[in-house]
Image (spheres, rainbow, N blue to C red):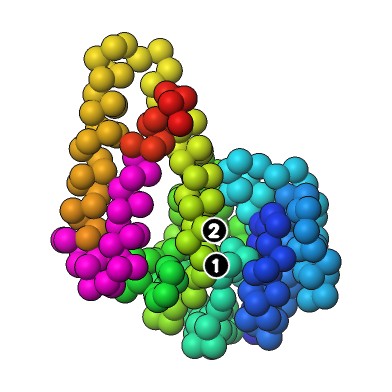
Amino acid sequence: MQKLSVVLATYNEEENIASCLTSIKDLADEIIVVDGSSKDNTVEIAKKYNAKIAVVENKPNFHINKQKAIEIATKEWVLQLDADERVSEELAHEIKSKIKNSSNVKENGYWIPRKNWFLTRFLMKGGQYPDYTLRLYARGKGRLPQKDVHEQAVVEGNIGYMISPLLHYPYQNFSSYIKKWNRYNEFFAGQIGERLKNKNLIWQLIYAVGYLIIKPGHWFLTSYVRHKGFMDYLDGFVFSLFSALRFPISYLKYLKIL
């Protein structure tokens, strides 16, 4: 039986961390938590699950600390989670069956479908399911580029697919959604600034039209109409709307208008 390290990067996750670690306590042979100097009880709660903990500086791109956790892991396989995620019983059984015998494992990593909870339901339309994420990989075969907040891991060799879902509860309520949405927009505004550094006026105008008009319109029509976000009712409309609004808001933040 090959063993599994579950790794997390955390910052002020006391309301989520216990549920996350409870979902994997019978699955993980080792739990690694790299904490970005939380101001709450995240670390104390993680210690109750016998997690190995490293306290470091909190980074704007939290994938930097996720990669640190991956590098600390010592078992044959690594499952990278966020504190607001839960491993379903079905997924836990599937992971065990995939990695239990090294001679039968032909893949170095696995895409896992993810269900995302938003307001009152898991979003099943609007391009939100299956939200495949590459989180399980053989140690030494997977890494994070650490360039973008929505990037996927890079895995060497063959990659397979899981069937059972990872459950994602990113927002406790609409207020927490707006807070996280705003934080991402600040990060995107910084990316826009990097891309437009030393660009001429024509490029500046192209970006302005793209972020203020073309991108938000295209995103909303794609997610709400083409991918049938309307079938998730009000939740689907709100998600599609604010997903589209991140483009103009990020651009206005880059201009320091907001």
Crowd band around label 2 with a 10 angstrom C-alpha radius: few (<14), some (14–19), many (20+): few
Q: Position of residue 232 (x, y in %)?
A: 28, 72
Name which quarter of the figure residue 164 lies in. Answer: bottom left
> Which one is nearer the viewer's eye here, 220 or 84?
220
Residue 184, magenta (yes or no): no
Q: Which residue is drawn at 31% across and 11% down?
A: 200
Give how far across and how far down residue 230 sits, in percent. 22, 68
Three-letter amino acid code at disc 2? Ser
- Which stretch is magenta? 225-247
- Residue bearing the label numbered 1: 172
Residue drawn at point x = 51 percent, y = 38 percent: 187
Can the viewer see residue 104? Answer: yes
Q: In this view, does 138 lie above or below 65?
A: below
Any mark on residue 176, and which?
2
Magenta stretch, main secondary structure, is helix
The label shown at residue 238 is none
The three-letter code of the residue at mark 1 reads Gln
Q: Per the image, is 229 magenta?
A: yes
Q: Position of residue 120 (x, y in %)?
A: 42, 75
Question: Where does the C terminus fall, quadrant-wise?
Answer: top left
